[in-house]
Amino acid sequence: MGTFSEESWPQIKEKRLTRPILTRAVASEDDYYNYEFAPERWRYLAVKMRSPDGVHSLTGYCLRASELGVAMANLVG
């Protein structure tokens, strides 16, 4: 199955990217909040992202009240 991403899933996980990149993923809202996100989980939207082949996954966070947070909540929630 052909998919496009600026970085491969193993590279994304290894580099722990903080800059925006274009990648293909299956996304859903998640309830996992780690480290610095746990104390203020009400402020953040957790998004579970899985690679199209289902082999890799990671959780991303964005501020719920931000433009991105509202857009993501509409897409995954």
Image (cartoon, grey):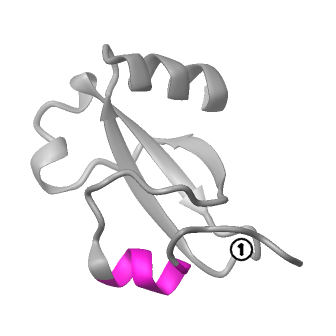
Q: Is residue 74 left or right of residue 4?
A: left
Which residue is found at the position 26% from the left and 57% from the top?
A: 18
Residue 35 position, x and y percent, is 13, 55
Q: Which residues are magenta?
A: 8-14
Residue that protrudes farthest toward the front in the picture: 6
> Residue 46 sits in which quadrant?
top left
Which residue is found at the position 63% from the left and 32% from the top?
A: 76
Q: Is residue 56 left or right of residue 41?
A: right
In this picture, is 25 found above or below 47? below
In this picture, is 13 found above or below 75? below
| Depth check, front residue: 38 or 8 | 8
Which residue is found at the position 53% from the left and 78% from the top?
A: 9
Please name the residue that numbered disc 1 is placed on: 54
Residue 31 position, x and y percent, is 42, 42
Q: Quadrant of the C terminus?
A: top right
Q: Secondary structure at mark 1?
A: loop
Q: Residues within 10 Å of mark 1 (few under 14, many from 20)?
A: few
Residue that protrudes farthest toward the right in the picture: 1
Q: Is residue 51 magenta?
A: no
| Depth check, front residue: 18 or 45 | 18
